[in-house]
Structure formats: structure tokens, C-alpha cells
Amino acid sequence: MSGDRSFQLLEVRADRLDASPATPRRRWSEEAKARLVEETLAPDANVSAIARRHGVLPSQLFGWRRQALKAGTVAPVDRGEAVGFAQVQQVPSPGMIEIVIADAVVRVGADVDARQLQVVLRAVRAR
């Protein structure tokens, strides 16, 4: 044995050895759940953004919404006529996409802004 006699002290916290989380579970009232679910049913609602804003996991909020719809406590929002499919065809020009929705054709380049394309496609579907 050498003349250096050092030792290490390990600190153990019993509460962190369990499989339980460091913070206790939050309990959401039925009113709070209903309010959040109603917010997700609004047209153009982003469920993940709503969940982040309120400190809930998106999967939890989707689960609450699924349960509420199944139980009939909320009604699904009618978003108009649903488009069954969108046909995508290759266009002769490289980097171009042609999107056919019903009788409308939308051609876009690779540099199109995703938000702007979303606005255009919603407008085409709404007509």
C-alpha cells in the first residue's frame, strides 16, 4: 500500500433509487382537462403547441381528447369535406412538384415556403 491514504465519500439518496419520478404526479381536474381538450378541437389547433404551453405531454393530451370523443363529452369539429387523397405526379421540370386535389392543380418548386404552401392547399381544399 502506498503512503497516500485517500478515500471517496458517496452520497446516496434513497428517494432517487426508486423508479418514481423526482417530482410528484400532477392531478388535473376534469374541468382543466375539458378546457384543454376543447382548445385542441379548434380549427387549425396545434395539439403539440397547446400541450407545451400548458406543460403536458402531447401524448397525454391526445389521450384525453380520444377519451373525451369516445365518451361523447365533446363533439368532433366538422372541418368540411375531407380530401380522400392528393395525387402527386412528376413534372418535367426538375425540382418541381405537381399536387392534384380534385380538379385543381398546384405546382410548386423545391424552394417553396412550407407555411405558404399550407395556406395555398387549405384555400384549394376550401373551395
Image (tube, grey):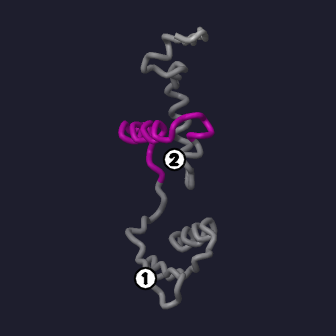
Residue 39 image offset from top left, x and y in percent: 56, 43
Residue 102 image offset from top left, x and y in percent: 43, 78
Kind of element beneath mark 1: strand
Query: Which of the two residues, 15 or 85, is positioned nearer the viewer here?
Result: 15
> Residue 115's image quarter?
bottom right
Marks 1 and 2, how far apart in space? 33 Å
Q: Are marks 1 and 2 in contact (CB under 8 Å)?
A: no
The residue under label 2 is 41
Q: Amino acid at mark 1?
A: Gln
Residue 17 image offset from top left, x and y in percent: 46, 16
Residue 67 image offset from top left, x and y in percent: 39, 37
Q: Residues within 10 Å of mark 2 (few under 14, many from 20)?
A: some
Query: Which of the two residues, 65 or 24, is positioned nearer the viewer here?
Result: 24
- What's the residue at 58%, 80% (across, down)? 109
The residue under label 1 is 89
Of the two numbered discs 1 and 2 on the same chain, state the one appearing first in sequence: 2
By secondary structure, the bulk of the magenta-drawn segment is best described as helix
Which residues, given as a range, are shown in magenta? 51-77
- What's the residue at 47%, 62% (across, down)? 80
Q: Residue furthest bottom?
A: 92
Q: Amino acid at mark 2?
A: Leu
Marking on residue 9: none
Kind of element beneath mark 2: loop
- What's the residue at 52%, 25% (across, down)? 28
Q: Is 32 covered by the magenta stretch?
A: no
> Residue 88's image quarter?
bottom left
Height in image: 34 above or below 96? above
